[in-house]
Image: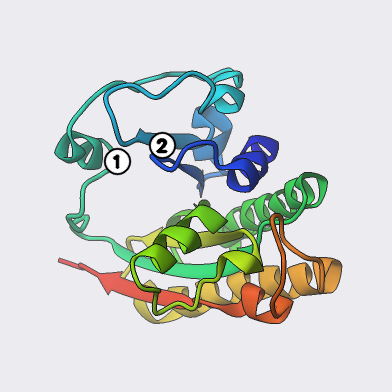
Amino acid sequence: MFTAISNFVRDYPDAKAAVIPTFQFGLPANLLNLVGGPLFFFFYDGPTPPAGVFDEFDAIPSLSDSTGTMSYYELTQMAGGAAPIPGFGASFREDTYPNLPTPNMTDFYGIVWDKMNSESFKNSLRPLDVQIMGFDPQPVSVRIARASNAQGGNALGLDPNNGDRIWIENNFLWLNSNCDEKCPSFSQSVSDDIKATQKQTYGGMKPTNYQSGDVSFIKSVVPISVFMSDQN
C-alpha cells in the first residue's frame, strides 16, 4: 500500500481522483490494526472512474469493500461525518513532507508506521488513555498547485515547480479528560520525532516531479495543529 500511495502521488493519473489512506492503532496491543487493517477512502468526481485510475490499489487484497456511486453526503457519513464524538477529546496535527522517489517514500512510510505502532503500544504504560492514534497520508501533487495557479494562486505558496508533497495527519482520540492537556503535547512530540527522523535520513532529497525551488520550504510548509474536546 505504501508503494501504491507513493506512485499515485507521483503519477496522479486523473485530476478527478483522490485517495486518503487511514492507518489507525488502538489498544489493547494495537488490536484495531491487527484485526481490521488500514481503511482506504477512494474518491472520483464522477459516476464511474476510468479504467486504470485505481488499479494499483485495487490489486491489494481487502477484507471488505463498500465502494460505489453515492452522493457527497453519503460519502461523508460513511467516513464518520463532521460531528464531534460525544465524550471524546481529539487532536489532529498536519505536517508536510516531500513525496520522495518510491523506494525512499515506502521506507519513510514504514518509519511512520513503526513509530505510531510503537507509541500506541507504549501508551498502555502511560496514564493518557489514548483510545486511537494513527496517521493519514494526503496527496498534494503538482496537479493541485497547477490548478491553484490557474485560479489565481494560493495562500500556501504551492508551486508546481517544487514537485509533489504529501500531508501526513497524525490523529489522537481519548476518553479521559485528564488527557486534554497532555495528549496534544504527546501528539506534537510524536510528530516532531518523525520530522527529525525524516530530516536526518532524507534531508535535501528532492521530491518527485521536482524542477526547481527551495527543498527546505517544500518540507516545512503547512504545520497545522487542531485540538477539540467534547467531554460531556
Residue 61 position by quadrant: top right
Tell me: 17 left or right of 116.
left
Q: Residue 167: horizontal and vertical position, in percent?
A: 53, 61
Q: In this view, does 38 lie above or below 174?
A: above
For image coordinates 74% across by 51% down, the residue present is 105
Crowding near the residue tagged with mark 2, few <14, some 14–19, many ≥20 C-alpha atoms within 10 Å: some
Residue picked out by circle 2:
41
Q: Depth check: 83 or 124 in front?
A: 83
Real-space Cα separation, disc 1 to disc 2, in angstroms: 8 Å
Residue extending farthest right: 201
Left or right: where does residue 51 sit relative to residue 173?
Answer: right
| Secondary structure under the numbered disc 2 in the rendered image | strand
Quadrant for the C terminus in the image: bottom left
Label 1 or label 2, whichever lies nearer to me, is 2
Q: Can residue 130 be seen in this view?
A: no
Residue 173: which quarter of the image? bottom left
Q: Residue at x 70, y 38 (%)?
A: 3
Residue 86 rendering spot, x and y as whole percentages: 18, 57
- Residue of label 1: 79
Q: Upstream in the sequence, badge 1 or badge 2?
A: 2
Dot 1: element: loop
At label 2, the amino acid type is Phe
Q: Which quarter shows the N terminus? A: top right
- In the picture, measured across the screen, residue 10 lies left or right of residue 76, that is right
- Contact, mark 1 vs mark 2 (Cβ under 8 Å): yes
Q: Residues within 10 Å of mark 1 (few under 14, many from 20)?
A: few
Residue 8: x and y in percent read 59, 40
